[in-house]
Image (cartoon, rainbow, N blue to C red):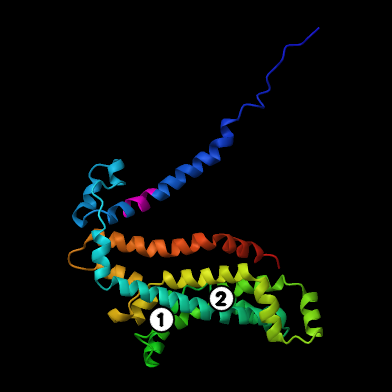
């Protein structure tokens, strides 16, 4: 006697299994639509940017008369100099900031001294307080020190970053203590331990800390607004704000400037995102 075969439905995918993917796609599209509209607006003549909203359709996201006039006109002014200033300030901040942050993290992770926990607590507190809360009194000090409208004035506040120190310190704690002790027995100095052991092993953490410093400096607005008042020392975000503050706003150029200031850090982040993710994951090892 045979029993009829009953389908268990195991081979048939459940609709509920695809729900998270569908939700993720919908959320991604909702986030992408404003960005695509800005990109499309940067390729339209300034007088037609807002006209594309009269009838919401695919033409709002795909310009039929695309032109690079907005980008050409943008870089014929002072915006190109502002972008170069932003790149220079961000690059120097990352280089000096990594040196300072890695040195501080090495000292906090390797050496035992009284008050080490208190120092680390102050560092944690430093990146929990918004920088804009102390920007105005700090700018008064910088003016007294004749650092206004100087590259040094724009760079110095970004060098000491508590989050970068935290990421590196947590990564350094994962370096085997036995490896350090063996190196010390072989006669390696503490500087050698730092440069030959900790730094080579901490490349993901260094990249993550560097991206933190770069992002903080690139998107900074309040500080360069207070310190870089001369056009020759303006950074990209300030130049973008200047475009929006004119009597007659050319939205095509405004959108083009927004695209430029978004693409540069986006390329950097996409190129190094794997190392950044690894540094964040390893920061919780100890």
Residue 36 shown in magenta: yes
Q: Tell me if 162 is positioned left or right of 48 in this view.
A: right
* Residue positioned 75% across, 85% down in the render: 188
Of callouts 2 and 1, the N-terminal one? 1
The quarter of the picture where the N terminus appears is top right
> Which residue is identified by label 1?
154
Q: Which residues are magenta?
A: 33-38
* Residue positioned 65% across, 81% down in the render: 118
Image x and y of residue 245, in percent:
24, 68
Image x and y of residue 22, in percent:
50, 39
Image x and y of residue 135, in percent:
41, 79
Which corner quadrant of the image does residue 116 belong to? Answer: bottom right
Q: Main secondary structure of the magenta part?
A: helix
Badge 2 marks a residue whose secondary structure is helix
> Which residue is identified by label 2?
162
284 is higher (above) or lower (below) than 60: below
Which corner quadrant of the image does residue 82 belong to? Answer: bottom left
Comparing 52 with 180, the one in front is 180
Badge 1 marks a residue whose secondary structure is helix
Tell me the crowding category of disc 2: few under 14, some 14 to 19, or many 20 or more residues within 10 angstroms, Cα based. many
Tell me the crowding category of disc 1: few under 14, some 14 to 19, or many 20 or more residues within 10 angstroms, Cα based. many
Circle nearer the viewer, 2 or 1: 1
The quarter of the picture where the C terminus appears is bottom right
Comparing 173 with 36, the one in front is 36
Q: Tell me if 181 is positioned left or right of 60 in this view.
A: right
């Amino acid at each position: 006697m045979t029993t009829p075969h009953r389908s268990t439905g195991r081979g048939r995918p459940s609709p509920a299994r695809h729900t998270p993917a569908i939700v993720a796609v919908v959320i991604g599209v909702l986030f992408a639509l404003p960005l695509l509209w800005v990109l499309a607006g940067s390729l339209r003549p300034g007088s037609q940017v807002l006209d594309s909203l009269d009838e919401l359709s695919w033409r709002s996201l795909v310009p039929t008369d695309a032109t690079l006039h907005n980008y050409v006109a943008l870089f014929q002014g002072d915006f190109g100099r502002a972008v170069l200033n932003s790149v220079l300030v961000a690059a120097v901040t990352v280089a000096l900031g990594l040196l300072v942050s890695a040195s501080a993290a090495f000292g906090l992770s390797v050496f035992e001294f009284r008050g080490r926990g208190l120092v680390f607590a102050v560092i944690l507190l430093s990146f929990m307080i918004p920088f804009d809360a102390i920007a105005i009194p700090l700018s008064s000090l910088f003016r007294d020190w004749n650092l206004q409208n100087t590259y040094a004035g724009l760079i110095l506040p970004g060098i000491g970053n508590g989050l970068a120190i935290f990421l590196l310190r947590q990564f350094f704690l994962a370096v085997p203590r036995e490896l350090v002790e063996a190196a010390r027995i072989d006669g390696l100095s503490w500087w050698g331990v730092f440069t030959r052991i900790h730094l080579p092993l901490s490349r993901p953490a260094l990249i993550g800390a560097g991206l933190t410093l770069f992002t903080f400096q690139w998107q900074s607005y309040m500080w360069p607004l207070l310190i870089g008042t001369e056009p020759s020392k303006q950074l990209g975000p300030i130049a973008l704000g200047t475009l929006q503050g004119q009597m007659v706003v050319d939205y095509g150029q405004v959108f083009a400037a927004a695209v430029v200031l978004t693409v540069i850090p986006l390329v950097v982040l996409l190129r190094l995102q794997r190392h950044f993710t690894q540094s964040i994951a390893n920061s919780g090892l100890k």
